[in-house]
Amino acid sequence: MVQLLIVYHSRTGGSRQMAEAAFAAAREEVSSTLKSAADAEPDDLLSADGYIFCAPENLAAISGIMKDFFDRCYYPVLGRIEGRPYAQMVCAGSDGENAARQTARIAKGWRLREVQEPLIICTEAQTPEEILAPKTISDDKLKSCRELGAAMGMGLSLGVF
């Protein structure tokens, strides 16, 4: 059975909502697993046929816990997941581009195949209070996350990827 793995980190709730939206749509198309970056392991990556990575951008980079996931898993799966499809989502206060570039570089090292441009949801949080506050992502923006999850699920189930 084809398996999609969604790995996410969220401190203020935005990325979690995005990952959950993608997961809800993907599981209607294909067997899917949603794991926090703190709990995801190399075996999770090896067991999956495709991936969605979802993280907040913190200080113009992916969050530390998401980076820790990549650090822990990188070498144990290197050369063993090549060619598998992936997409990514970033929850950002301003632009999210650097976090997306970081994840793309890691995925390139694994020789994963990007099947969609990064989805960046911008919260416009700019002050320390706004940045640290719990996030609520609008249904309009979550629609894009659901569409990404459904597309990944359908692409995997149909063998398109």
Image (cartoon, rainbow, N blue to C red):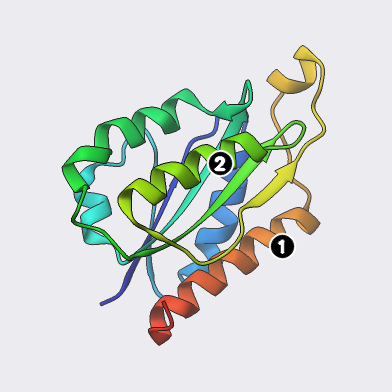
Name the residue rendered at 21%, 56% in the picture. 46
Quarter that holds the N terminus: bottom left
**Element on which disc 2 rests:** helix
Residue 43, placed above or below residue 115: above
Q: CA distance from mark 2 to mark 1?
A: 23 Å
Name the residue rendered at 81%, 16% in the picture. 127
Task: Tell me the quarter of the picture where residue 96 sits.
Answer: top right
Q: Nearer the viewer, residue 112 or 37?
A: 112
Name the residue rendered at 31%, 31% in the picture. 71
**Element on which disc 1 rests:** helix
Q: Position of residue 125 (x, y in %)?
A: 79, 27
Q: Nearer the viewer, residue 17 or 55?
A: 55
Which of the two labelled residues, at mark 2 and mark 1, occupies the earlier sequence position? 2
Mark 2 burial class by Cα count in 10 Å: few <14, some 14-19, many 20+: some
What's the mark number on residue 113?
none
Q: Which residue is mark 2?
A: 101
Along the horizontal axis of the image, is 29 left or right of 129? left
Task: Tell me the quarter of the picture where residue 86 sits.
Answer: bottom left
Q: Is residue 103 visible?
A: yes
Q: Nearer the viewer, residue 110 or 33?
A: 110
Q: Position of residue 109 (x, y in %)?
A: 34, 46
Q: Which residue is mark 1?
A: 143
